[in-house]
Image: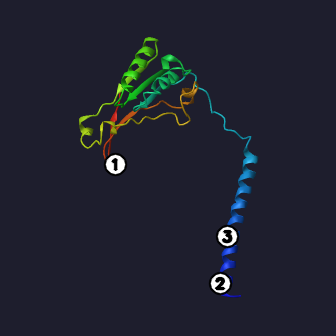
């Protein structure tokens, strides 16, 4: 055998070995899936009284969906005295007026909802790329995947809300929103 044939066979068997290891791994994963598929995690307990929940909706130039978003969150099934909704608006178009009007309408219906336009503190103004450069970061339930009717019940601890002003570059200044 020539060295070219040996090199070709060595490469062939190496690829064959890698594929067989990959295939065995898939069999192991399939076995583990079928072995544990009925072993679902159960909640450790239930709240005697549900905790207060703040849902923050960061919005930026969403004039076509902001009404539906606010209405969907307002329909969440959670005790009204324990639920607070904040619309955090950083828009530069007609979204501000649309969101403000929807928030006012829902507030008249007795829902605890607040409209908060973006504010840029003096210490963050320097270096911001544009009026749209500020953004809100809020901590939300990790198991919450969207505004569904049972979304707020996923909460396991009180939610702390923070506002962040993102400036040009990698620097961020934390500002507590009360």
Q: Nearer the viewer, residue 159 or 137?
A: 137
Quadrant of the image occupied by residue 17: bottom right
Comparing 128 with 174, the one in front is 128
On the image, numbered disc 2 is attached to which residue?
4
Image quadrant containing the C terminus: top left
Say which residue appears at 46% left-offset and 27% top-offset. Answer: 64
The residue that mark 3 highlights is 15
On screen, residue 27 versus residue 108, left or right, reads right
| Mark 1 element type | loop
- Asked which secondary structure carries label 2, the reply is helix
Distance from the alpha carbon under mark 3 to that under mark 2: 17 Å
Residue 132 drawn at (x, y percent): 34, 37
- Contact? badges 1 and 2 (CB < 8 Å): no
- Sequence order check, earlier mark of 1 and 2: 2
User: Which residue is rendered at x = 44% and y = 18% of the image?
Assistant: 112
Q: Earlier in the sequence, mark 3 or mark 2?
A: 2
Can you tell which quarter of the image residue 105 is in?
top left
SS label for mark 3: helix
What x and y, as percent, mark residue 77?
Answer: 56, 20
Labels 3 & 1 near each other (Cβ < 8 A): no
**Few, some or many residues within 10 Å of mark 3 (<14, 14–19, 20+):** few
Above or below for 62 versus 25: above
**Residue contact at pointers 3 and 2, CB within 8 angstroms:** no
Q: Earlier in the sequence, mark 3 or mark 1?
A: 3
Q: CA distance from mark 1 to mark 2?
A: 53 Å
Report which residue position mark 1 lands on: 170
Image quadrant holding the N terminus, namely: bottom right
């Amino acid at each position: 055998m020539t060295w070219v044939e040996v090199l070709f066979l060595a490469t062939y068997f190496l690829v064959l070995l890698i594929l067989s290891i990959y295939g065995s791994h898939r069999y192991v994963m399939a076995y583990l899936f079928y072995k544990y598929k009925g072993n679902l995690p159960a909640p450790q307990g239930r709240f005697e009284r549900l905790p207060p929940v703040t849902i923050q909706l960061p919005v930026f130039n969403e004039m076509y969906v902001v009404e539906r978003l606010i209405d969907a969150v307002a329909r969440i099934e959670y005790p009204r005295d324990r639920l607070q909704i904040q619309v955090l608006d950083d828009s530069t178009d007609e979204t501000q007026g649309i969101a403000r009007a929807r928030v006012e309408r829902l507030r008249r219906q007795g829902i605890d909802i607040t409209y908060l336009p973006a504010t840029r503190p003096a210490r963050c103004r320097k270096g911001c790329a544009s009026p749209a450069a500020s953004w809100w970061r809020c901590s939300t339930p990790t198991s919450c995947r969207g505004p569904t009717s049972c979304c707020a019940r996923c909460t396991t601890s009180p939610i702390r809300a923070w506002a962040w002003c993102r400036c040009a570059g990698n620097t961020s200044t934390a500002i507590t929103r009360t």
